[in-house]
Amino acid sequence: MGRKLLSRTICGEPIVFYRSRDGRPVALADRCVHRRYPLSLGRLQDDSIECGYHGFVFDCSGACTFVPGQDRVPRTARVPSYQVVERDKWIWIWIGDQSEADPALVPDAHWLDDPEWASVEDMAYSPFRYGLLMDNLMDLSHETYLHAGLIGTPEIARTPFTTHVDDARNRVTFSRHMEAVACPPFYEKTTGYTTPIDRWQDVAFQPPAFWVNNVRVAPQGTPVGPNGDEGGAHVKILHGLTPETENSTWDFWAVVRDFALDDDSVSQALLTMNQEVVQQDLDALTVLEQVVASEPPGTQELSVEIDAGGLAARAMLRKINP
């Protein structure tokens, strides 16, 4: 995001983003108070937006500073502004009551800006409801089937996992540790490891929108040292899930690693392969959205043990947003 007007709809609210001249991100409601024309179709005038329809001008706070044809600016001539925080390469916005915005609630994604880690990032527009993507990320057994040949191996679906709900910290976590398993291309091509490997998946979900898969891969039997995990390679796959409407979602994702930090070929391989993984999810969930949308209200679904993480995440979301 730079000195251009960027239009996004988040949780059904049209928003225009831009940067002020000092680089600060700004977010305003993307509707002029006059005739509701999108401000994103206007132009920047210093640090203000000039509406492209009738020329009303709004500053960074959303206050109207100029009305064509008259000297007096009506007291009610302002558009809502949103509190935003730029941290770890991502911009976080508070949707809802702005008096309740708390920067301390911004999730920790420091790996994106940490020189000890290298990252690749992308985003995907997803024409399906946010809950489908949340369920997908909270049940990684689907990797065995949907992502076979990329990141999935048979052992993922066969290995039991543990789920933990931390109401105090507002987290749902689940862990799956596998020993002496196949090394999928996702890691073979980037770490150089070959089968068999030890592979960990320690996933943390922070409602309403942040998901991290903490991965450790290492040659079979590589020990964990007394001062922490000093062996193997570590990857973190991050998703910032951003509902656009009730039936569409923006998925902002990143893959960070603590090895081959300056190897562009590794970065490109991770970027390309994760784009393929995300596309496979997108294709499957687009079909599922059509199925779910066509079913009558109250249609029942069957949940089993592999759904424990997803069901816990659903429950926590209901708790914080009844």
Image (tube, rainbow, N blue to C red):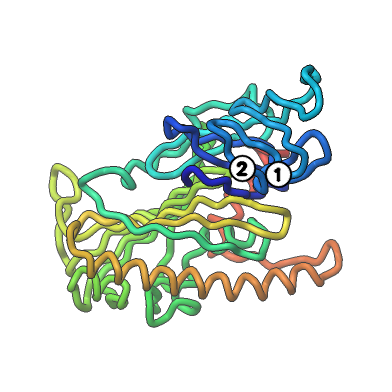
Mark closer to the chain start, 2 or 1: 2
Separation (CA) of disc 2 from disc 1:
7 Å
Give the residue drawn at x 53%, y 63%: 124
Q: Are marks 2 and 1 in contact (CB under 8 Å)?
A: yes
**Coordinates of residue 172 in the picture (x, y in percent):** 50, 46
The 10 Å Cα crowd at callout 2, few under 14, some 14 to 19, many 20 or more, is some
Relative vertical location of residue 133 with respect to residue 98 in this rendering, above or below:
below
Q: Give the residue number, with chain letter if any, for mark 1.
A: 52
Q: Is residue 303 left or right of residue 136?
A: right
**Coordinates of residue 55 in the picture (x, y in percent):** 72, 36
Which image quarter holds the C terminus? top right
Closer to the camera in the image, 83 or 144: 83
Label 1 amino acid?
Gly
Q: Is residue 122 left or right of residue 110?
A: right
Q: Give the residue number, with chain letter if any, for mark 2.
A: 43
Picture mark count: 2
**Do we see residue 128 in this rendering?**
yes
Residue 126 picture quarter: bottom right
**Coordinates of residue 214 in the picture (x, y in percent):** 35, 54
The 10 Å Cα crowd at callout 1, few under 14, some 14 to 19, many 20 or more, is some
Asked which secondary structure carries label 2, the reply is strand
